[in-house]
Image (tube, grey):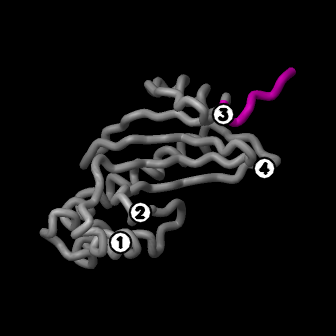
Amino acid sequence: MRVPSLFETIVKYFEQDGWEFTRLPGHQALEMGAAGEHGNYRLIAVVEADHPIVRFLTFVEGKVPEARRREVMEFLTRANYGLLLGSFEFDVSDGEVRFKCSADLEDAELTHAQFSNLLLIGLTVMDRYFPGLQRVIQGTADPAAAIAEAEV
């Protein structure tokens, strides 16, 4: 009996859970939208071509204006400090913000529970910090105050 690939397993789990997704051409990746309590997010699940690594990326809509990138970097650095799983990433060149949660599955199979946890960690953490991130982007809160509010 053939063992399904990691990518096939992820596709199966998304289908079982009723997600609507698009396959990204040329990649072992799926893209979909998700709504949280505080915002709407774009999700991408990626299986690395040469390694048994899966990444779940949660993106905010839009880009951070150049004038606010320094404050956003501080906000994201403060948010990352103490996170047990995953991390925020920031593309300084274009202002893209995302949260990454990944797993190395060498000599292991991805269970449905692990899949769900990886997916939900990204959504939950992004949604928790999103209001503060928005206030920092808009210039209505400083990074330290916005983090203090998010981590109450």
Question: Residue beneath label 4, please?
Answer: 106
**Residue 40 spot, x, y in % from top left:** 29, 42
CA gap, disc 4 and disc 2: 28 Å
Of the two numbered discs 3 and 1 in the rendering, the one whose residue sits closer to the viewer: 1
User: Relative to 148, does residue 43 appear above or below in the rendering?
Assistant: above
* Discs 4, 2 touching: Cβ within 8 Å: no
Q: Secondary structure at mark 1?
A: helix
Query: Mark 3: which secondary structure?
Result: helix
Query: What is the residue that sits farthest to the top in this orientation?
Result: 1
Are there few (<14), some (14-19), or many (20+) residues within 10 Å of tag 1?
A: some
What kind of residue is marked 3? Phe
Q: Say which residue appears at 22% left-offset and 67% top-offset.
A: 136
The magenta segment = 1-7
Marks 2,1: beta carbons within 8 A: yes
Give whichever of discs 2 and 1 has the lower sequence position: 1
Quadrant (top left/top right/bottom left/bottom right) for the N terminus: top right
Tell whether 96 sits left or right of 87: left
Looking at the rendered image, the disc whose residue lies closer to the viewer, 2 or 3, is 2
The residues bearing labels 2 and 3 have C-alpha atoms spaced at a distance of: 26 Å
Residue denoted by label 3 = 7
Q: Is there CB contact under 8 Å for labels 2 and 3?
A: no
* x and y, in percent, of residue 152 in the image: 29, 69
Give the left or right position of residue 47, taking residue 146 as reference.
right
Is residue 108 shown in magenta? Answer: no
Q: Which one is earlier in the sequence, the residue at label 4 or at label 1?
A: 1
**Are circles 4 and 3 on residues that touch, CB within 8 Å?**
no
Mark 4 and mark 3 lie on one chain; the one further toward the N terminus is 3
Q: Residues within 10 Å of mark 3 (few under 14, many from 20)?
A: many
Q: Residue furthest front?
A: 93
Which residue is the site of mark 2?
A: 90
Disc 4 to disc 3, C-alpha distance: 14 Å
